[in-house]
């Protein structure tokens, strides 16, 4: 770990000022991912801005009938919130499918969105990785890549986004609210938040330097049956091979997003029109252009089969 | 004490303390954090500084140059040890590759430097400033690709490379029922919780190392040999060990580099391997490719048994002895086994819990299931039909005890085997496809010399000292039980001190030989102490009774404390073995039963029930023995379903080198586990009439899981681990 300086501002304005003073600074909240990465010197910020004192820790109804979730709400608290469990059950289930009780107690809503890939080549600083060190190549292409992406990958990077929560947020059409260093706020639909790796897999989302997530807003509840179906090699504390977040209405229409298959939660609204036709039709559209690797061709049939299981569960 | 005739009645047979389910006497220390592990000896060594190990970034080649200047100038840095400045180093008997590499690099993450600094953070930060230029050379990293270059390995702990009895080829060719299949098992990591760690301190030319090590005497020898100093100048202290599973049998880089670092900076130095180094710097269980052939009569008698195994290791390394159990498990007049060893430039392969038998049975016990099905026989019946009471390769040697059949029958009864539909893929529970499987368990019981010293003081307290280790197995407790039984005192009157090379040399912990040999050594020392007590009081040692804290004979009864007197009494002895283990075969047996559910949509396997029935001689402490067996069953479940070190065949290293990437079972993966110990004593094993169970518990488990998955789905997977991707193509269509 490289030596770094640290401060804990009390207001968003102070935090903004801190980012202006310290280019390359990182925000830290739960630290469940950042500290690991700093110990391995994959992240080496010279300055840490601890945002835990900024508030943003409430879950509140919005005037539009939705739910505003503070960026610092812990995963455990979000999963347990009565409104979330009742109206956005897919989110509660996705949260509980992730990490461990201890990690969920520390991890925050914004931190969960921003967690970095678990690609082992990203984590081993002896190995090439375009995401960690642009231009060095990708160790996972042609290496061990059973966990990796089958959709939206590039010749520079085949990493996946590891979050379960983000997959549920995607299917719920969440909006990410931020404040920039200059104090300006903006709202980013989650569909526009994540980036595919392309030639710059080191750039993972559309946040600007110094931009801080303050809230994640959920629109009015859409009803329906909520399912989060996560497939993994052991029963807990493992990242998804494939996951399916689905909201299915009584008439068979609905929404679906995938985790574990791409650099971002994977949702194609056009595919959802096929939901009444069943899993195969939806999967065919979701998987259009899939490029499996040497070790993960199984994810293609697994998506369809998991989707089928999720739809069956939604029917009750 | 020479143990060369079968045990007769002795004080252990009283079973006042031995054989009782006894809580760990070290339990309160562990649960309150007062049991100090290798990295935690702050009181003994308050002024230690911190060493951080740098592992090689390539798998094979040379260090072209190494630039320490920036690192040396970093804050807090006290010194940096490399092969260039460490002085002349020897190589230990038990490690294959050098523990401090350079300029030649033999495997990925081989240690190439130790950065020593005032704080841990400074050492880690400075390590990043060490600039190393490498020259890579081509290596061999793919077992399947080099398999056919394998040669006959030198005979070792697993016996000869090849054995043959009768005419295997002829009998196999002539057999009306034939079976021939190939299986693979992957590289596996010990993945113990406590990483390898050591604190080293020099006083003049005397070295003390607080470490985490299963075999104190082996590692004293190898540390002295590597440093080129007399053994007498090395003291190892390892009272508590946070898991070993064979990964801590030997001297490793943490202890050597702590010693070299402490010598270089003239301060005590502490070193823990960070998690990725535990995987690629230390040892692992090597992958195997195994071919099994059976010939049988139509009614299911095996006439030909062939088992070949291929594995790889660094040059001068050793094979995974996966054919060992096949030499002993089933009858059959014509048989052959063979092991071949190829050179691989992956990290060093070595022992992991039940080396040989664990991967060997992963293959053999699937093959038995497959052959039973081919014959139309119940798999339990088929095994019983081919049971033997003598060493099948040397029929003049009987087994000392062999209750395999009883294990299978008891387990079948308890598990409800009778209700099983023999046809696969017939039972559903909602979306789960249900299946049950069975496998035999087999692990040899080894006789090893083991010594102990026993002290009796004037309060009647009995103190046992031996360099035996407790790697979580319960050694402290069974040693205390043995001394309490022998001296006729309550457990609370016994103090046990372990893991210090100043104590008499024990058998150590490995190969499930710890329980019966280490307590055998304590039995021998206590026998001598009883003689000393009797002699001091002028009593007849043969008829003296030790009970309730007193020694009594000829109408006299004296409290032990009074007998010891102010000076106390001390006795030391070792258990040593004759040729009983040559005349008869000492082994442990068991049967594993498993029920699984396989998700019909996704292929995820969840274990629903597990039962082990074990026949392993006298069970010294049913509570800690059960813990050993359920832990081993859990490890077997991991081997079946998820554990695999993933090899990058280009760069030559294990990619998933942390506990997020190398998955072992979590609590949610393991159902209620039931363990039954058959009531058995084995007078050929030791005066304790006991044998080990810690490795028996893993033997066969993975095959029982594999057989249950087959029974659930009809899909036969011969390549471990049985992850869902290997089942997907065999599952029913989804709607």
Image (spheres, coloured by chain):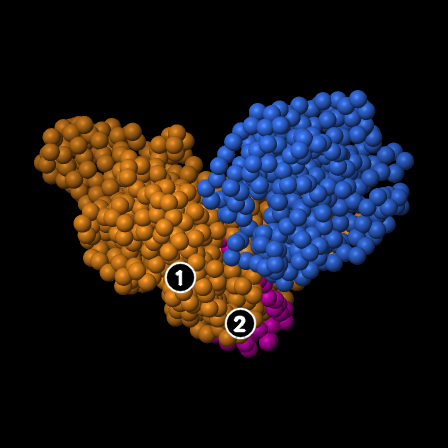
Image position of B503 (left or right of B677): left
Q: Is residue A223 magenta?
A: no
Q: Is mark 1 on a helix, strand or loop?
A: strand
Q: Chain A is drawn in which colour?
A: blue
Residue B279, percent across and down?
47, 53
Residue A15 in sight in this render? yes
Closest to the camera, between mark 2 and mark 1, is 1
Q: In terms of image quadrants, where is residue B534?
A: top left
**Foreground residue among B522 and B289:** B289
Per the rendered image, the range of residues in magenta is B164-190
Q: In this view, does A168 lie above or below B275?
A: above
Q: In this view, does B174 lie above or below A273?
A: below
Residue B22, percent across and down?
38, 33
Chain painted in orange in the figure: B
**Tag on residue B66?**
1
Count residues near mark 2 (Cα–Cα under 10 Å), then give few for <14, some for 14-19, many for 20+.
Answer: some
Q: Name the residue under label 2.
A: B146
Residue found at x 38% / y 64%: B102
Residue found at x 39% / y 52%: B71
- The reply to whether the C-beta atoms of the residues labelled 2 and 1 are less than 8 Å apart is no
Count residues near mark 1 (Cα–Cα under 10 Å), then give few for <14, some for 14-19, many for 20+.
Answer: some
């Amino acid at each position: 770990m490289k030596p770094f300086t640290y401060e804990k501002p009390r207001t968003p304005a102070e935090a903004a000022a801190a980012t202006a003073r310290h280019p390359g600074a990182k925000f830290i909240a739960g630290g469940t991912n950042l500290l690991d990465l700093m110990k391995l010197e994959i992240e080496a910020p010279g300055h840490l801005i601890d945002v835990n004192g900024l508030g943003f820790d409430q879950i509140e109804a919005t005037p539009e009938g939705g739910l505003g979730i503070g960026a610092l709400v812990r995963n455990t608290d979000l999963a347990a919130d009565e409104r979330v469990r009742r109206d956005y059950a897919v989110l509660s289930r996705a949260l509980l499918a992730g990490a461990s009780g201890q990690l969920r107690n520390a991890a925050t809503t914004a931190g969960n969105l921003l967690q970095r890939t678990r690609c082992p080549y990203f984590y081993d600083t002896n190995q090439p990785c375009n995401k960690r060190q642009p231009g060095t190549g990708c160790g996972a292409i042609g290496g061990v890549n059973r966990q990796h992406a089958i959709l939206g990958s590039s010749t520079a990077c085949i990493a996946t986004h590891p979050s379960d929560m983000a997959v549920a947020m995607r299917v719920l059409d969440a909006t990410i609210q931020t404040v920039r260093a200059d104090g300006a706020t903006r709202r980013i639909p989650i569909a526009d938040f994540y980036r595919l790796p392309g030639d710059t897999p080191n750039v993972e989302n559309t946040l600007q330097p110094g931009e801080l997530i303050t809230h994640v807003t959920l629109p009015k509840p859409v009803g329906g049956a909520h399912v989060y179906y996560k497939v993994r090699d052991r029963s807990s504390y493992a990242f998804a091979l494939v996951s399916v977040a689905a909201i299915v209405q009584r008439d068979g229409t609905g929404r679906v997003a995938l985790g574990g298959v791409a650099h971002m939660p994977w949702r194609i609204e056009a595919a959802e029109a096929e939901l009444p036709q069943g899993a195969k039709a939806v999967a065919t559209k979701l998987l259009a252009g899939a490029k499996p690797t040497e070790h993960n061709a199984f994810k293609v049939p697994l998506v369809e089969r998991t989707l089928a299981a999720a739809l069956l569960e939604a029917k009750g | 004490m020479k143990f060369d005739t079968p045990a007769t009645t002795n004080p252990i047979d009283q079973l006042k303390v031995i054989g009782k389910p006894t809580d760990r006497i070290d339990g309160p220390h562990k649960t309150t954090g007062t049991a100090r592990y290798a990295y935690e000896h702050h009181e003994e060594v308050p002024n230690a500084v911190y060493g951080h190990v740098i592992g090689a970034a390539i798998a094979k080649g040379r260090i072209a140059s190494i630039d320490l200047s920036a690192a040396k100038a970093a804050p807090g840095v006290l010194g940096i040890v490399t092969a260039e400045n460490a002085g002349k180093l020897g190589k230990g008997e038990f490690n294959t590759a050098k523990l401090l590499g350079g300029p030649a690099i033999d495997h990925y993450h081989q240690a190439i430097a130790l950065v020593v600094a005032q704080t841990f953070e400074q050492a880690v930060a400075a390590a990043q400033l060490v600039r190393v230029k490498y020259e890579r050379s081509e290596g061999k990293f793919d077992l399947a690709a080099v398999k056919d270059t394998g040669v006959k390995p030198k005979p070792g702990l697993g016996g000869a490379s090849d054995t043959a009895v009768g005419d295997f080829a002829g009998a196999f060719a002539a057999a009306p029922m034939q079976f021939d299949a190939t299986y693979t098992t992957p590289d596996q990591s010990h993945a113990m919780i406590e990483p390898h760690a050591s604190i080293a301190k020099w006083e003049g030319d005397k070295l003390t190392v607080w470490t985490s090590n299963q075999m104190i005497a082996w590692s004293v020898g190898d540390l002295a040999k590597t440093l080129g100093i007399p053994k007498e100048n090395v003291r190892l202290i390892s009272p508590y060990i946070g898991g070993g599973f064979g990964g801590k049998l030997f001297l490793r880089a943490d202890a050597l580099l702590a010693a070299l670092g402490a010598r270089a900076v003239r301060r005590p130095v502490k070193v823990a391997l960070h998690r990725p180094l535990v995987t690629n710097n230390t040892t692992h269980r090597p992958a195997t490719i195994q071919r099994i052939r059976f010939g049988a009569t139509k009614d299911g008698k095996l006439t030909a048994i062939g088992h070949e195994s291929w594995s790889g290791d660094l040059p001068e390394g050793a094979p995974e002895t996966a054919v060992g159990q096949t030499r002993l498990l089933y009858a059959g007049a014509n048989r052959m086994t063979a092991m071949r060893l190829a050179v691989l430039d992956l990290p060093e392969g070595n022992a992991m819990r039940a080396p040989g038998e664990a991967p060997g049975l992963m293959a053999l016990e699937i093959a038995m299931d497959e052959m039973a099905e081919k014959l139309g026989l119940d798999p339990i019946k088929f095994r019983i039909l081919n049971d033997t009471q003598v060493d099948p390769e040397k029929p003049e040697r009987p087994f000392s005890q062999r209750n395999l059949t009883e294990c299978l029958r008891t387990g079948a009864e308890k598990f409800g085997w009778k209700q099983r539909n023999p046809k696969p893929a017939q039972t559903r529970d909602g979306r789960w496809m249900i299946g049950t499987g069975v496998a035999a368990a087999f692990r040899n019981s080894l006789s090893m010399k083991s010594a102990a010293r026993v002290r009796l003081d004037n309060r009647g307290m009995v103190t046992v000292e031996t360099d035996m280790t407790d790697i979580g197995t319960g050694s402290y407790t069974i040693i205390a039980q043995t001394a309490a039984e022998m001296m006729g005192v309550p457990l609370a009157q016994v103090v046990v001190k372990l893991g210090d090379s100043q104590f008499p040399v024990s058998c150590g912990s490995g190969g499930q030989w710890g329980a019966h040999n280490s307590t055998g050594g304590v039995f021998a020392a206590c026998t001598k102490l009883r003689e000393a007590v009797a002699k001091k009081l002028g009593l007849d040692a043969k008829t003296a009774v030790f009970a309730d804290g007193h020694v009594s004979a000829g109408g006299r009864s004296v409290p032990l404390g009074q007998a010891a007197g102010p000076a106390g009494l001390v006795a030391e002895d070792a258990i040593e073995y004759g040729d009983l283990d040559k005349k008869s075969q000492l082994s442990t047996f068991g049967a594993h039963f498993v029920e699984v559910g396989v998700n019909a949509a996704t292929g995820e396997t969840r274990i629903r029930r597990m039962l082990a029935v074990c026949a392993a001689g006298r069970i010294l402490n049913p509570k800690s023995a059960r813990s050993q067996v359920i832990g081993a069953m859990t490890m077997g479940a991991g081997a079946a379903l998820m554990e695999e070190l993933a090899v990058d065949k280009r760069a030559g290293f294990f990619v998933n080198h942390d506990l997020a990437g190398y998955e072992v079972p979590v609590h949610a993966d393991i159902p209620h586990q039931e363990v039954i110990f058959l009531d058995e004593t084995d007078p050929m094993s030791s005066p304790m009439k006991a044998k080990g169970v810690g490795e028996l518990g893993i033997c066969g488990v993975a095959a029982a899981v594999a057989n249950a998955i087959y029974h659930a789905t009809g899909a036969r997977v011969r390549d471990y681990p049985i992850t869902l991707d290997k089942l997907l193509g065999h599952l029913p269509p989804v709607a």
